[in-house]
């Protein structure tokens, strides 16, 4: 058996949200497409027995934030940072500014 394959094949049945923390200087954000807020989202994967299991890189990368009102995943913003409207997500910092800390 391939050890690497065994390590990445985690059989989780529940993904538990531990916390969401704003890690940028301010929590303020306007829906004008010219600002961003950095969030740190921590989750824990559990197996059928409630034991913690690791997520593979691919599983972790597939986690998406969901719009509360519509129930749809937030769109991923292109590397260029261009957005047509509304909210979006990216895993890397782009050229848009954080709201100044107060």
Image: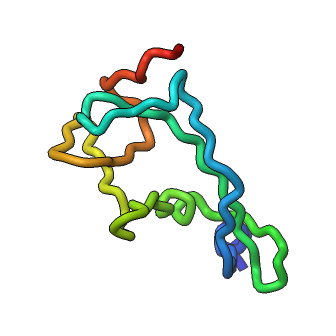
Tell me which corner region of the image, top left, top right, bottom left or bottom right, holds residue 8.
bottom right
Seen from the viewer's position, the closer of residues 100 and 40 is: 100
Q: Is residue 79 above or below residue 60?
A: above
Image location (x, y in percent) of residue 63: 50, 62
Taking the spot 19% from the left edge, 38% from the top edge, the residue there is 82
Q: Is residue 14 above or below residue 48?
A: above
Number of numbered markers: 0
Image color mode: rainbow
Which residue extends farthest left?
84
Q: Nearer the viewer, residue 29 or 3?
A: 29
Residue lying furthest bottom: 48
- The N terminus: image quadrant: bottom right
- State the image coordinates of residue 72 (x, y, percent, origin top left): 35, 68
Please state the horizontal and vertical placement of residue 7, each as a whole percent of the image.
72, 68
Question: From the viewer's perspective, is residue 92 above or below residue 101?
Answer: below
x%, y% of residue 34?
A: 26, 29
Q: Residue at x 45, y 33 (%)?
A: 37
């Amino acid at each position: 058996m391939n050890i690497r394959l065994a390590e990445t094949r985690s059989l989780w049945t529940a993904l538990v949200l531990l916390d969401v923390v704003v890690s940028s200087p301010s929590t303020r954000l306007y829906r004008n497409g010219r600002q961003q807020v950095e969030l740190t989202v921590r989750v824990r994967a559990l197996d059928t027995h409630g034991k913690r299991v690791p997520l593979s890189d691919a599983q972790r990368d597939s986690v998406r934030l969901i719009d509360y009102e519509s129930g749809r995943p937030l769109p991923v913003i292109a590397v260029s940072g261009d957005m047509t409207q509304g909210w979006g997500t990216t895993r890397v910092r782009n050229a848009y500014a954080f709201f100044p800390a107060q």
